[in-house]
Each structure stands twice: as C-alpha cells, then as structure tokens.
Amino acid sequence: MPSAEPRISVIIPTCDRHERVALCLSRLARQQRAPDQVVLVDNGLEPVTAPPGVECLRAPVRCGASQARNLGAAVAAHPWLAFLDDDDHWSDNYLADLAREIRQHPQATLHLCPLRVEGPQPLDKHFQVGRDERVLLYRNPGVVGSNLVVHRDTFLSLGGFDASLPAAEDRALGWRFVAQGQGVQVSDRRRAHLNHHEGERLSHWRSRLRGNWRFYRAHRSVMSWREQGKAMAVMALCLWQGGGWRR
C-alpha cells in the first residue's frame, strides 16, 4: 500500500533583506509541487511584508538564523520541515522529489541533497552516506541551512539548531542526527543553490571561525586525534582566508 502524501512546511528565516527574501519567495512559487505551508520568520529591525499564502512570524530582533528556524519549527503545522535561507533557492523539482523520497524511504528522518555554491567559481558539495558522517566533526561536507529536511518530531526531540553557534550550526544538527542513529537519505535528483552576493552571509570568516571553535570544544571528546588535527587545520585556513593570520 503506498504511503500517504507527506505534508511539508517550508521554514525561511530572514533579517532585513527584503529584496532577497522577495526573490527567494518568487522562486519558491515556481516549485512543481507547492509547499503545504510557508513560514517566514522575520528577525529584522524593519518588519517584512509577507505575500498572500505566506505566514509571517515576528521573532526577537537579530535573534539569529538558528533561533529563527527553531521558532518556525515550533509553529509549523506539518510533520516535515524543509529549511531555506532567504538568499538561496532550490531547483524547481525540489519539493516534488522530496515528497517522493519521503514516501520511498520511510525510515529516514533527515533528507539531504547536493548543493551548489554559486559565484565566479561555482562549487558543488555532495554529502555521501557511509563516507561523510564523521567528516561532520571537522568540516562541512554539504549540510547547510538550505538543503536540510527533517522530521519535525525528531528535530524537536534533538533540540533543533544550536543557537549558541554563530556558524557550523547546520553540521552540528547533522551530527546529532547521525550520532543518534537516525536514518539519513540523500537524493541526487534535486539541488539547493547557495547564492553569491556582496551582503554578509553567516559564512563570513569571523562567524565561521567562532562557530567552528565552539563546535570543536563541544565535540572534541568524541573526535580522534586525526579528526582533531583536521579540525584545527580547517580553523587555521579560515583565519588565513579572512586575513586574521596577518593581524
């Protein structure tokens, strides 16, 4: 007997980027399968006006993307949560393929897909089950706030995104799913696109460095010496790329 059609809530945190979130929502409207709910969590100084069909939740000003996502998850009406940052977008078949994948793999509570970092030199990342689980402990192999789809009950039971991390909160969540033995499924048929622009992303080098350091301190007890060394190398590279090495 085929599984019932999964119900999916899309959670979009936004903060004072009205033009970008408008573009994000217009691209979301192109999906071959419409979302069952869209929750826009606004933590900016100036409130955003949501278009018809989009629920807008005001969050504490500048509370951060992690807390905004968690607040959106708390009010979501459906069992599946698809997270999307306000400056990114999905391939048009994203939700249609996701619904099919959820039906075909009922044991999975975390669904991922390849992502493309757009820019002058595009970069593709693809998390592979059976290869990249422990890679999460020292770098991000392709788990971000725009290609994470989770079962709501499991997400809430694991505490959601860690709001104490200024970055690396996405791989921290991925690691908690892996460490708890949750099923992880990856689809090659859809894609998340991280858009390059002049505005500051959470991936600014200072945020990455602080987030990676806090992640390392919280998880080093379960890391091998080799993994700890790789984590330190990632942080050193982050510092060098940001110019902090020369200060």
Image (cartoon, rainbow, N blue to C red):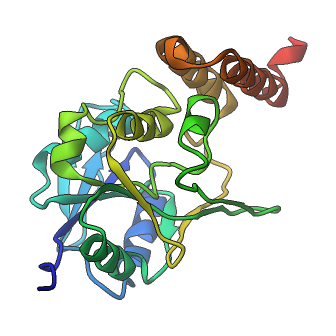
Percent across and percent down for residue 168 are 52, 32
In the displayed structure, does residue 55 sit left or right of residue 177?
left
Q: Looking at the rendering, which quadrant does residue 169 occupy?
A: top left
Q: Residue at x 11, y 85 (%)?
A: 1
In the displayed structure, does residue 156 sit left or right of residue 190?
left
| The C terminus, quarter of image | top right
**Nearest the eye: 220 or 58:** 220
Asked if one can make out residue 39 in the rendered structure from this viewpoint, the answer is yes
In the displayed structure, does residue 79 sit left or right of residue 133?
left
Q: Is residue 216 above or below residue 142?
A: above
Q: Is residue 154 above or below residue 18?
A: above
Asked if one can make out residue 214 in the rendered structure from this viewpoint, the answer is no
Q: Residue at x 50, y 18 (%)?
A: 222
Q: Looking at the rendering, which quadrant does residue 107 occupy?
A: bottom left
What residue occupies the far right of the structure in this picture?
246
Q: Residue at x 33, y 30 (%)?
A: 63
Percent across and percent down for residue 31 are 37, 83
Percent across and percent down for residue 8 are 21, 67
The number of callouts visible is 0
Percent across and percent down for residue 195 are 61, 60
